[in-house]
Image (spheres, grey):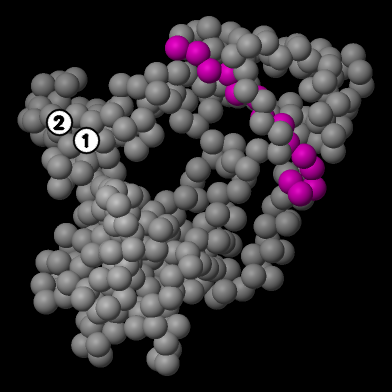
Amino acid sequence: MEECLDNGGQIILFLNRRGSASYTQCRNCGASVQCRRCDIALTYHKESDRLICHYCGVRRTAPAKCPRCMSYRMSHYGVGTEGVVKEVSELFPDANTLRFDRDATRGARAHDKLLERFRSGEAQVLVGTQMVAKGHHFPSVNLVGVVSADTGLNIPDYRAGERTFQLLCQVAGRAGRGPLAGKVIIQTYQPDNYAVQAASRQDFQRYYDEEMRFRQDQANPPLSKLIRLVYTHTNLARCEVEAVRMARATTEQRAAWGYSDIDLLGPTPAYPARLRGHYRWHLVLRGPEPRLLLDRVEVPNGWTVDIDPVTLT
């Protein structure tokens, strides 16, 4: 970064996580501050000094003491775009740094105004989420840094590697679009992951070969079709009981009609297991024609049916 700034270049730092810290935890008992409506840790935003849920939007003041053990040893952990901007400003005080995420671009034409400031050279460093990765042309950007490329790899979805590969390739394409060669640096705790390896080399064929091998082993699309059924309810016990009942009924119909080539995955809690005060359980039908089995099963109210789901979260 120092070399790039000394040469008059611009820098994009990509981190697909907003806020200053990913979670707030007590160093005494280990309890983390969770959203009361969602099964997710609240993200700390230093600018507003608030803990915010990025799923339902709930905001609350950061507690001075732990709600479980009442100790005053609360600390913020992890990093988000706000935290990266703070670090860059401290390391390079002479460089003007902009943040490009949903929190920083809420006003009318805020996107255009912020990008124009960066394009005109008013700022030297642009820190952002996936909003910075796609479709932007900045000829003066000679360096792209990816902070924590593993953010999306550990999500329980068979497309997690595909989305990570896409994002890394897209953000890498922001560097070197001018007369000078660009450089991309990827920070990761999983340097041997096939998606990260292929993206670092822009090797689409290698990624395709590895991904198709994985999809074939797991019988995932495009080698099969998926149907996802999600049940939501404010009562956890009722949600689980209904999910188990539906799985049992589906299994009985599969046996009765002899659909041995259709797999039933679940039931399991969805990810996240609770959103906006509603618990979520799901099950997945997988096979060459899972619709045949679905047509034999009565789907009562409260269930959501997603044919060919683009995500399993």
Residue 224 shown in magenta: yes
Residue corresponding to mark 1: 51
Image position of 268 with respect to 312: above or below: above
Does residue 264 appear to the left or right of 128 in the view shown? right
Q: Which residue is painted at 61% across and 73% down in the image? A: 203
Which amino acid, by three-letter code, is at mark 1?
A: Leu
Give whichever of 79, 299 is nearer the camera: 299
Give whichever of 120, 157 is nearer the camera: 120
> Which quadrant, please, contains the N terminus?
bottom left
Which amino acid, by three-letter code, is at mark 2?
A: Thr
Mark 2 and 1 residues: CB-CB less than 8 Å, in contact? yes
Number of marks present in the image shown: 2
> Which quadrant, please, contains the C terminus?
top right
Mark 1 surroundings within 10 Å by alpha-carbon count, few (fewer than 14), some (14 through 19), many (20 or more) = many
Which numbered dot is residue 61?
A: 2
Q: Which residue is painted at 64% across and 65% down in the image? A: 207
- Residue farthest along the right direction in this orientation: 258
